[in-house]
């Protein structure tokens, strides 16, 4: 009898979490068919190389929605772009966990699965092997980068055009991205049209040297950046580059360059103070008025 009651109590306690999981909506940005020639299946698995859950072989970009409670909803939305070298998506630390944090603060969050290069059994392991050969790495991921950025632009445009359905304001739709997802975010920040203009942009430890010559738009949105000086991929200068581009254009920008934190700290950083970068991001969003109802 006690065993039965214990199991029943556990089931009741799990109900809210199950309801939340079921409630998340998946939106296909290009429904009906893949926007690429490849038709290999998308996969999700635990990568020992990165010690985290990853998504690979994305050919059909999608958005997964994480909605705030009606009591906290403030009308702001955000597209979240996980990183993974354009070969994988670090779906938890740089995607779902970020969405849950921001949804708890009233923001409607959309985790973007953008198109990736084709990979085999462990994309993270393949990335590490390829990254040391810059020419080969560029040949593998180079063709997909414009597609990934296009997916970022389409994601912002989609949320803006469907804002009323999600109870958000079209002029309060921003984007945040990590590493390769930060490249997608920077691309959106520099290449948007009127339909895909983000209200704010946050490239986190982004690879952005490819945008060195790109002009900052006249109506560029405010920019938030976080990175670490000891970035193991050597990307700290890319964050400084973006900050300098925005400030040279006399646009609003905030940069957090931490002494320690490495690359890919996301939401699972063991270092201080990078463990609290997301709190600084929330402070900045509040300062810019995006947490206000």
Image: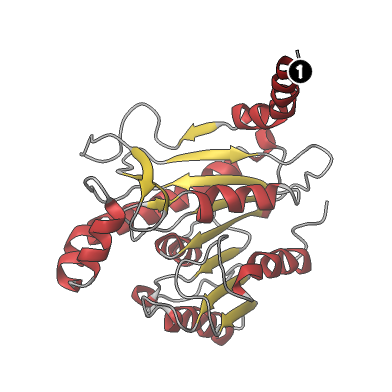
Residue 271's spot in the image, x, y percent? 57, 73
Describe the element under mark 1 as helix, strand or loop. helix
* Picture residue at 44% right of the left edge, 59% below the top: 181
Please name whichever residue, 146 or 270, is drawn nearer the observer in this view of the structure. Answer: 270
Residue 252 on image: x %, y %: 65, 77
In the image: residue 172, left or right of residue 292? left
Q: Is residue 85 above or below residue 208?
A: above
**x, y percent for residue 93:** 52, 55
Q: Would residue 196 be visible to someone looking at this image? A: no
Viewer-proximal residue, 268 or 254?
A: 268
Display coloring: secondary structure
Q: Quadrant of residue 62?
A: top left
**Would residue 5 be seen by someone viewing this image from the given angle?**
yes
The residue that mark 1 highlights is: 2
The answer to whether residue 289 is left or right of residue 93 is right
Badge count: 1
The one of 93 and 25 positioned closer to us in this rendering: 93
């Amino acid at each position: 009898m006690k065993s039965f009651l214990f199991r029943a109590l556990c089931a009741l306690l799990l109900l809210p979490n199950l309801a939340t999981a079921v409630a998340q909506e998946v939106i296909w940005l290009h429904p009906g068919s893949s926007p690429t020639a490849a038709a290999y299946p998308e996969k999700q698995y635990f990568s020992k190389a990165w010690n985290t859950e990853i998504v690979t072989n994305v050919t059909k970009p999608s958005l997964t929605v994480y909605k705030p409670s009606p009591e906290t909803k403030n009308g702001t939305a955000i597209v979240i772009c996980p990183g993974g070298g354009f070969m994988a998506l670090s779906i938890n630390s740089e995607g779902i966990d970020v969405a849950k944090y921001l949804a708890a603060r009233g923001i409607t969050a959309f985790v973007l699965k953008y198109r990736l290069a084709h990979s085999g059994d462990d994309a993270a392991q393949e990335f590490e092997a390829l990254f040391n050969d810059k020419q080969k790495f560029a040949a593998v991921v180079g063709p997909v980068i414009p597609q990934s950025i296009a997916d970022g632009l389409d994601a912002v445009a989609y949320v803006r055009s469907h804002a009323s359905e999600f109870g958000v304001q079209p002029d309060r739709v921003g984007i945040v991205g990590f590493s390769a997802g930060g490249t997608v975010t920077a691309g959106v920040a520099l290449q948007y049209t009127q339909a895909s203009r983000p209200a704010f942009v946050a490239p986190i430890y982004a690879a952005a040297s490819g945008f060195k010559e790109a002009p900052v738009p006249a109506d560029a949105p405010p920019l938030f950046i976080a990175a670490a000086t000891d970035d193991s991929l050597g990307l700290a200068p890319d964050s400084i580059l973006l900050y300098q581009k925005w400030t040279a254009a006399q646009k609003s920008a905030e940069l957090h360059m931490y002494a320690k934190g490495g690359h890919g700290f996301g939401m699972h950083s063991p270092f201080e103070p990078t463990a609290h970068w997301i709190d600084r991001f929330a402070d900045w969003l509040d300062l810019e008025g995006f947490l206000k109802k």
